[in-house]
Image: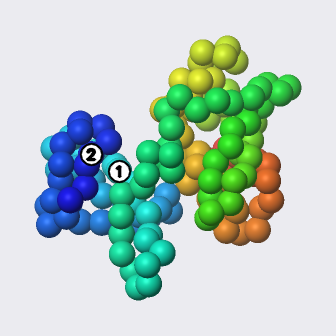
Amino acid sequence: MWNCKHCKVDVSRHNAHPAIDSLGIYFVCPGCFERNPLTGSKRGGVRLQQAAASEALSLNRPFLRSDGDLFFSQTIQNKRLQVQVTRECLDRVFGSDGSVSQDSEVLRVNLNHIVGIATQKQRDGSRSPIKVLCADFGLI
């Protein structure tokens, strides 16, 4: 049994099948159609479990701004890394006006996508801080 982090409904594993994409393993709640992350258990074989609250993507995460860029910490593949979203990316891709409140909202709304890009870059060999750029979204 899993629990939807959005609508708080208990969901049978028979009603919500796990899936995988570039952002990781997840299930979609059949009630609210929201994505919920899953993690692999370390108990031999493959066993999926719901991510602990501390591992889930926090909506109120602290971040640092330096020269307009936004930095936050994220655990990726069992490593604590810093992710850097450039000012240009915040402006051009996400439409931020540069204010702290707007940057916070951009991060809250787009966190799954940003972390998915950072995860792929980490797999491809990028080191911390992992820089998320406009080019990652097809903008040059």
**Identity, as a three-letter code, of the amino acid under mark 2:** Cys
**Identity, as a three-letter code, of the amino acid under mark 1:** Asn
**84 or 91, nearer to the observer:** 84
For this orientation, the residue located farthest to the front is 43
What is the secondary structure assignment of the residue under circle 1? strand
Figure quadrant of residue 68: top right
Residue 109 placement (x, y as % from top left): 48, 32
- Characterize the local packing of mark 2: few (<14), some (14-19) or many (20 or more) Cα atoms within 10 angstroms: many
* Residue on which the image places disc 2: 4
Q: Is residue 110 visible?
A: yes
**86 or 100, nearer to the observer:** 100
Residue 85 placement (x, y as % from top left): 71, 38
Indicate which disc, 2 or 1, sits on the residue closer to the N terminus.
2
Q: How many marks?
A: 2
**75 or 98, nearer to the observer:** 75
Circles 2 and 1, Cβ within 8 Å, touching? The answer is: yes
Q: CA distance from mark 2 to mark 1?
A: 7 Å
Q: How is the image coloured?
A: rainbow
Residue 127 placement (x, y as % from top left): 80, 59
Q: Residue at x 14, y 66 (%)?
A: 14
**Which quadrant of the rendered structure holds the C terminus?**
top right
In-image side of 59 versus 33 (left or right)? right
For this orientation, the residue located farthest to the right is 67
Q: Residue at x 48, y 75 (%)?
A: 42
Residue 99 placement (x, y as % from top left): 67, 14
* Residue on which the image places disc 1: 36
In-image side of 72 versus 126 (left or right)? left
Q: In this rendering, is residue 58 above or below 137?
A: above
Give the number of the disc on residue 104. none
What is the secondary structure assignment of the residue under circle 2? loop
Q: Residue at x 41, y 85 (%)?
A: 45
**Which quadrant of the rendered structure holds the N terminus?**
bottom left
